[in-house]
Amino acid sequence: VQVVESGGGLVQPGGTLRLSCAATGDISSMYIMGWYRQAPGKSRELVATATSAGLTEYADFVKGRATIDIDNRKLTVDLQMGSLNPEDTAVYYCYAQVGTILTQYLHVWGQGTVVTVAS
């Protein structure tokens, strides 16, 4: 099982970020998918998550400017975040909590995609 991120790169201040993530492998159940980030010198922190039931959670620093969209059938999760500022510069990681034939709850992390907010 793995998750693969796409999107990211250089974004201008005030711009919009769009990230996509797809989970692949022998997945029997999908519970949660979402995004975390880690800025230089800081710990990894939650950005936004969504459950298979459609419940969402957003970090305070993105409330009102981010939308997370999960597709249970495609096993994908998209993040759109606007009004970017340099403090949003970080490596963004996709996360999934899934079930497989062998493991009821498996935590899967992506490799990360670099997002740099600069003019």
Image: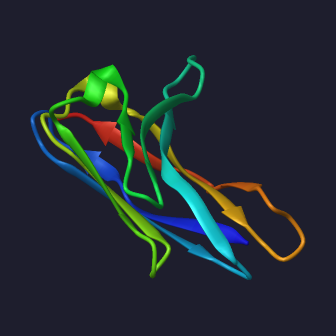
Tell how many labels. 0
Q: Which of 4 and 68 is in front in this view?
A: 68
Seen at 51% across and 55% down, the residue is 33
**Quarter assignment of residue 117:** top left
Seen at 67% across and 63% down, the residue is 98
Q: Residue furthest toward the front?
A: 53
Question: Residue 91: x, y in percent?
Answer: 49, 40
Q: Residue furthest toward the right?
A: 102
**Quarter assignment of residue 63:** top left
Seen at 16% across and 47% down, the residue is 16
Q: Is residue 65 above or below residue 72?
A: above
Seen at 56% across and 68% down, the residue is 4
Figure colour scheme: rainbow
Question: Residue 86: x, y in percent?
Answer: 26, 25
Residue 111 placement, left or right of 69: right
Q: Which of 21 and 64 is in front in this view?
A: 64
Q: In this view, does 33 lie above or below 63?
A: below
**Quadrant occupied by the N terminus:** bottom right
Residue 96 placement, left or right of 114: right
Residue 32 placement, left or right of 90: right
Question: Residue 28: x, y in percent?
Answer: 69, 78
Q: Nearer the viewer, residue 82 or 66?
A: 66
